[in-house]
Image (cartoon, rainbow, N blue to C red):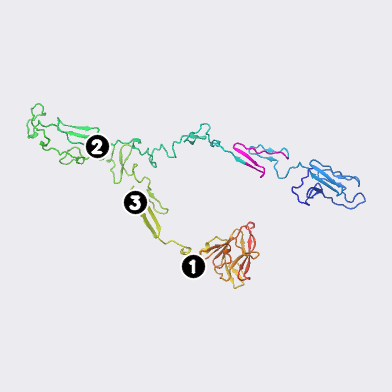
Amino acid sequence: MALAFPNSPLVGDQYTSGGVTWQWNGTTWDIVISGGGGGGGGSSLSFATIAVSGQDSVSADSGADTLNLVAGTGMTITTNASTDTVTLTSSGGGASGNIFSTISTDTGANVVADASTDTLTIAGGVNIQSVGDAALDKITLDMTAFTIDFLSDVDTSTTAPTSGQVLKWNGTNWVPGVDSTTGGAGTDADTLDGFDSSYFLNYNNLNNKPSLLALTALSVGAAATASGNGSISYDNTTGVFTFTPPDLTSYITGVAWNDITSKPTTITGFGITDAFDGAYSSLTGRPTVPTDNNQLTNGAGYITGIGTLSIDALSDVDTTTSAPSSGQVLKWDGANWAPSASGGGGDVNQNAFSKISVTGQTDIDADSPTDTLTLAAGTNITLTTNAASDIVTITASGGGATDFDDLGDVTSAGLKVSDVYLPAITQLVVGHSGTSSYSFDQYTGGNPTIYAISGTTIAFNLQSVSASHPFQIQNAAGTAYDTGLVHVTDTGTVTTGSSANARTGGILYWKVPADISGGYRYQCTNHGAMVGSINIKSFATI
């Protein structure tokens, strides 16, 4: 049976196995010989039977019988007749403690040591490099440089990327593709809402756009010299209509046509050649020639039959089905340009809010695109506008609390800032009886033992403690203690650490450290009799 001697034994340590005890002498393990009772046979200091657990016992056949110790594998036996010492030395072969004989892997193929001196090699895999440091007995696993194609869902090998391309999802992997959006803005949007692309702002790029009517297409030029039967001509380049009056020089000028009896139905063939001298000014009842487009009205003295020109006269404009109202615009309804309350792209308030909501209040809706939202200053509020910078400044002009005592529910005799500075598990109101003892509102008697819990905060209200009785926290030896101490005056002045100890008035907070327990003290620094215990209970043991 192999002996499992302890690792790193101290001098004098003993190890027992199979009824035999060994003791470490600092270098080797020595067998400890125990004496037995006297007898008439052999030596009085010998074993009649040597028993080994799990093995056959070895018994002396006579008082002079000899027990032979034979060194097994990995064991050396050395005797010293002068000192009566038998030394058993392990000569190796046993594995050192706290090592793994089996290394498990993620793939399920475990690595098992073939011998106690077997070597486990840590080799780097894909993009992994193992680096050994013999001086520090350390192995470092470093990742080597790799490309984005190393990622399992990226494929840049099938199709190599070119400059300017981006990664696009093809349903299976992220692969190189053309960056058609150049920054994320859509290039095939079917509305203008929210876009200011130069493409959409180019009228020539719009589909189903109405034909434009130039004002020059409605212009009438000056009358030409009378000629023939007269005519109206149109210049397709300038868009101007020119009226040529008929030549009336051969027609009657002084006789009204209605005065003629048996008048022919036609003039041709009747010999009427000198009825008119040919001058336009010789005509009576002639219309006044308009000098500009503003005179194209159906009024007396002007050309009749043309009438007033309105926008509804255009073939693709309909303002009769639904009459327009103030503030409306023309909007394409699929068949015509018709009056509408919403703009068709020219509204200056495209990015404005039509509804203003305030929680708990009625919503404010804009009644029209040019409706005005008015900001009114309430109590203690001043509004200042700056038209040049488009800024409205809202300033509180008073009414807010500037310190704790300004709050309406705080009084000089009631709640103070020191009372609420830190959350505490409890607040003890401290008093005193002359120079003999302290008192606490939640305890009876003078100088009682106070209990606190580690990891919590306890508050001592010192507002009733006079200046002659400074209250100090101490450790069990009576030395001033300052860890976790915070003192707050009634006006809010805060001190910490040793400056917070031995104070009167205000509140003393003790943030009891989580790692302390046991006995601590409170002590009046002016009167030795005013002293008591503070017992800290460990939170972990409660």
Sequence-first tag of 3 and 1: 3
Sequence-first tag of 2 and 3: 2
Q: Give the spatial CA distance, label 2 vs label 3.
A: 39 Å
Residue 214 percent coordinates (x, y): 26, 37
Q: Amino acid at mark 1?
A: Ser
From the image, give the main secondary structure of the stretch colored magenta: loop
What range is drawn magenta here? 116-140
Q: Secondary structure at mark 1?
A: loop
Q: Amino acid at mark 3?
A: Thr
Q: Give the spatial CA distance, label 1 vs label 2.
A: 87 Å
Question: What residue is disc 3 on?
Answer: 372
Question: What residue is disc 2 on?
Answer: 216
Of circles 1 and 2, the one toward us is 2
Q: Give the residue drawn at x 54%, y 37%.
A: 148
Give the crowd class for mark 3: few <14, some 14-19, many >=20 residues within 10 Å: few
Q: Secondary structure at mark 2?
A: helix
Q: Give the residue drawn at x 33%, y 43%.
A: 346
Question: What residue is disc 1 on?
Answer: 412
Q: Amino acid at mark 2?
A: Thr
